[in-house]
Image: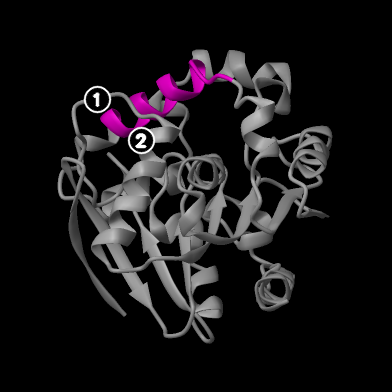
């Protein structure tokens, strides 16, 4: 594994490169780090691929830019990072907020996307139950999962940035607006859409995305939000790597 920082649109973006082969870019969820979202997945994928994992603005080891978060800006930041790394085209796997960022990459930077994996990605406000928006409007650092707080403190240079990250993520979600249908329908990349059957993302929303993205497949996997990739808040004592969707991902990428 090699790692480092890259100057990206006014921030110092942290990234890691694992393994060799065709590149796949991993984009973490909100409030998360590389490890908390993809700690279980990287080792399995990097056996046959070059895995590029990164941390977005205000998350983990990447600093804040004194500006609100947006999925469009995150998409532009990822595209710039790949340019800095001399990677002209890659596959992308985004989870949760990272899935929404991956959608924006496919919309704004279609030329760099080969295949797209959207894990529990949100494109419309109606894609989650009504309670979610009330919960986000009342979000506080105290209610943030301890595993995510610990994950941030473990890697961040300044632990005080935890509050900044939390507040920026919460504000972005409170003000989330629908991605227009025509932008979603314009996505040409072969796409795999994955959610859990007990996910915060509704099956109806995943099915709508599947219908709108012409070259897409949909998988609804038993379990909660991110359980299918071993996201840290879903791990239980009986966790088994064989429960993860790595074979499905590899079949899709290699097909």
Crowdedness of circle 1 by 10 Å Cα count: few (<14), some, many (20+)?
few
Secondary structure at numbered mark 2: helix
Residue on which disc 1 sits: 67
Residue 171 located within the stretch drawn in magenta = yes
The residue depicted at 44 percent of the width and 72 percent of the height is 51
Residue on which disc 2 sits: 73
Relative to 11, is 113 on the left or the right?
right
Residue 156 located within the stretch drawn in magenta = no
The residue depicted at 64 percent of the width and 45 percent of the height is 187
Relative to 160, is 22 on the left or the right?
right
> Does 168 sit above or below residue 27?
above
Q: Quadrant of the C terminus?
A: bottom right
User: Can you tell which of label 1 and label 2 is closer to the viewer?
Assistant: 2
Secondary structure at numbered mark 1: loop
* Span colored in magenta: 163-177
Q: Quadrant of the N terminus?
A: bottom left
> Does 227 sit above or below residue 127?
below
Q: Within the image, what quadrant is residue 50 found in?
A: bottom left
């Amino acid at each position: 594994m090699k790692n480092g920082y890259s100057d990206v649109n006014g921030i110092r973006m942290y990234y890691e490169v694992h393994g060799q082969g065709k590149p796949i870019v991993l984009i973490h969820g909100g409030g998360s780090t590389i490890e908390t979202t993809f700690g279980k997945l990287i080792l399995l994928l990097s056996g046959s691929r070059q895995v590029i994992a990164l941390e977005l603005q205000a998350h983990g080891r990447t600093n804040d830019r004194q500006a609100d978060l947006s999925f469009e800006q995150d998409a532009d930041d990822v595209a710039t990072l790949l340019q800095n790394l001399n990677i002209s085209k890659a596959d992308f796997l985004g989870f949760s907020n990272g899935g929404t960022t991956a959608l924006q990459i496919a919309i704004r930077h279609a030329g760099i996307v080969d295949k797209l994996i959207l894990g529990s990605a949100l494109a419309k406000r109606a894609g989650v139950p009504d309670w979610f928006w009330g919960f986000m409007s009342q979000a506080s650092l105290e209610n943030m999962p301890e595993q995510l707080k610990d994950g941030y403190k473990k890697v961040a240079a300044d632990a005080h940035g935890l509050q900044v990250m939390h507040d920026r993520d919460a504000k972005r979600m409170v003000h989330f607006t629908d991605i227009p249908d025509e932008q979603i329908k314009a996505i040409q990349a072969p796409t795999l859409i994955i959610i859990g059957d007990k996910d915060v993302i509704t099956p109806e929303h995943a099915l709508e995305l599947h219908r709108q993205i012409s070259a897409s497949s949909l998988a609804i996997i038993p379990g909660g939000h991110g359980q299918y990739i071993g996201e840290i808040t879903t791990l239980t004592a009986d966790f088994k790597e064989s429960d993860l969707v790595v074979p499905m991902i590899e079949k899709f990428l290699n097909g």
